[in-house]
Image (tube, helix red, strand yellow):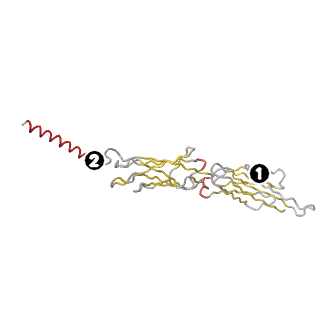
Amino acid sequence: MRRIFRGAAVGAVLAAGAIGASAVGVAPAFADGANATTLTLTGSQTSIVTGKQVTFTATISPAKVGTEKISGSVDFTITGADGSTVTCSSITALSPGGNSRCKVDKGVLLAGSAPYSVTASYGGSVSGTFGPSSGSTSLAVSATTTRTKMVLDATPVSGAATTVTATVVDGPATALLSGNVVFTVTSQYHGAGVKVLCSGGNVQALSAGTATCSLPAGWMMVPKVSRTVPKPSGAWSISAVYNGNASFITSFKSKHGTAKF
């Protein structure tokens, strides 16, 4: 009887060992932890000018483990060198291929805030199959050109007041424009005691892309007809210079003419 007992015990031990080995062999791949993933972040451009749009693409691999496709979402963080933050205008859902895109619309990014540091973070899948990962890149932004236009409310007439409006534009970045416009006005003849200056000074701040110079009556005069000057005239000149800044390049416009009595 003792021999039979020992044989049964040994058989039970061997059976238990076999069962244990079988359990380990069929365990799912993620039972001991999520599969490591890698996130690569790229931009549609590495350098742009102020106001241009750009798209960042996060690519996660692997995008498939066994029959399970990647799932979850990607968060994007965009921070300027000056500490300012920018949000994506849209973020696409994570595709079966492991891609998610962040689009930054035009009229947002400034050279004065660059370079921008961009980070994308993937939190992993709810199932636990795909582990978290992150990646980063940077974006350089340079100053963009501008164009200054100038309009007078009317052709200068001897003795009359004149309003000069300067408008600064730059396509998609126009709404971001800031800074000052400096007006320079000269007149060959002007009324006694009248200063050829804009009301409030010749340096005017941009507001909604425009700056105005209001010239008082008498800023430009033409002498009366006389024997010595039978056909009098007076020359005048007006210029508007946009000073620009770290994000916008300076530009200017000028007009000049001659008024008759």
User: Residue at coordinates 31% horizontally, 46% vertically from top-left?
Assistant: 31
Q: Quadrant of the C terminus?
A: bottom right
- Of mark 2 and mark 1, the one earlier in the sequence is 2
Task: Give how far apart the Cα atoms at labels 2 and 1 are.
Answer: 86 Å
User: Residue at coordinates 71% horizontally, 55% vertically from top-left?
Assistant: 252
Which residue was labeled with disc 2?
27
* Crowdedness near tag 2: few (<14), some (14–19) or many (≥20) residues, C-alpha within 10 Å: few
The quarter holding residue 151 reads: bottom right
User: Residue at coordinates 76% horizontally, 52% vertically from top-left?
Assistant: 184
Residue at the far bottom: name it.
Answer: 231
Residue at the far right: name it.
Answer: 227
The quarter holding residue 234 reads: bottom right
Which residue was labeled with disc 1?
197
What's the residue type where badge 2 is placed?
Ala
Spot occupied by residue 66 in the image (x, y as percentages of width and height): 33, 54
Horizontal relation, residue 21 to residue 183: left or right: left
